[in-house]
Image (spheres, grey):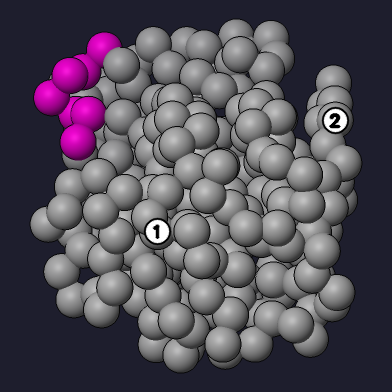
Amino acid sequence: MLDIRYSHRSSVASVADMDKNSKIAFLGLGSMGAPMARRVAAAGYPLTVWNRSPGRTEGFAAVAASPAEAVQDADVVVTMLADPAAVREVVASFTAKLKPGAVLVEASTIGPAAVQEVADLLPDEVTLVDAPVMGSIDRAASGELSLFVGGDADEVMPLLEEFGSVNRTGAVGTGAALKLVMINAVVNGVALIGEAVALADALGLPEDQVKRAMAASPLAGLAGRAFAEGAYFPVRLAAKDVALAVDAADLPIARAIHDRLTAYPDAATEDLGQIVKYFRA
């Protein structure tokens, strides 16, 4: 059962207080974080970025040497990191530098349990909003992501809307919870397509025929993702997300899919859709 115990409140008065003079710190410039941060800069907000690998910071005007340096004057801090361990480490390194009234927008996919851990790290008078995202790199660049937003997000809505459509989910942690549900449906669905194609191979059906049939069926969306070209959601991150779900509930199918995702080391850095070829092997 979801039980996020969080009562920190920001001293910022209202959404009107967030304007284009609000200072933003963006931590984590991975495949999704970098285009999201570029949208913040393009919108005119004063932006400072940090990334563990400095090479990803090229093109940004203000680059901090550490998370603590990045956040010290920030009104809003956005974290977009790989996993719960990375989020815990980075947040713990900067909490002492957060100014009263700051808002932390946690956009990584880490699950509600880790959101609670982040909440426990924060000082008083800092607001936590969990806002994990779904969508492709292209959609991140165009501001068409889907955001699942938990917590008191009124103050940061103008910023969140730069990233895409905002789905308000309730209390802190509910955004992270719904993201786990949604991403696991996608990952499990792509695995289903992979197994279906493997069955088609065993039965001697032509690949084109199978793809056409799927495209004309209720499976069209999942098949489209499984066979998408140019998409990039690494299998290792998909496996991480499934692991978070398996830790949260008894999910025997998801557990089996996790085992398959982690059975192919060569697939770890490939797009999730490429798992289909491993199912067919």
Around disc 2, counting alpha carbons within 10 Å, would you say few (fewer than 14), some (14 to 19), or many (20 or more)?
A: few
Q: Which residues are magenta?
A: 263-269
Q: Earlier in the sequence, mark 1 or mark 2?
A: 2
Q: Is 75 left, or right, of 43 in this rendering? A: right
**Closer to us: 91 or 32:** 91
Q: Is residue 264 covered in magenta?
A: yes
Quadrant the N terminus occupies? top right
Above or below, 2 against 175 in this view is above
User: Where does the image place residue 207, in percent across and percent down from the top left?
Assistant: 24, 44
User: Where does the image place residue 263, in percent across and percent down from the top left?
Assistant: 26, 12
**Closer to us: 198 or 133:** 133
Instruction: Residue at 87% x, 41% y: name it.
Output: 7
Which amino acid lies under the numbered mark 1 shown in the image of this protein? Ala
Q: Is residue 115 visible?
A: no
Around disc 1, counting alpha carbons within 10 Å, would you say few (fewer than 14), some (14 to 19), or many (20 or more)?
A: many
How many tags in the picture?
A: 2
Q: Is 2 left, or right, of 49 in this rendering? A: right
Which amino acid lies under the numbered mark 2 shown in the image of this protein? Arg
Above or below, 267 against 256 in this view is below
Instruction: Residue at 70% x, 58% y: name it.
Output: 100
What is the CA distance from the residue labelled 1 to the residue labelled 2? 27 Å
Which residue is the site of mark 1? Answer: 70
Quadrant in which residue 271 is drawn: top left
Which residue is the site of mark 2? Answer: 5
Check disc 1 and report its element: helix, strand or loop.
helix
Assess whether mark 2 and mark 1 are in contact (beta carbons under 8 angstroms).
no
Above or below, 253 against 176 in this view is above
Instruction: Residue at 38% x, 55% y: name it.
Output: 69
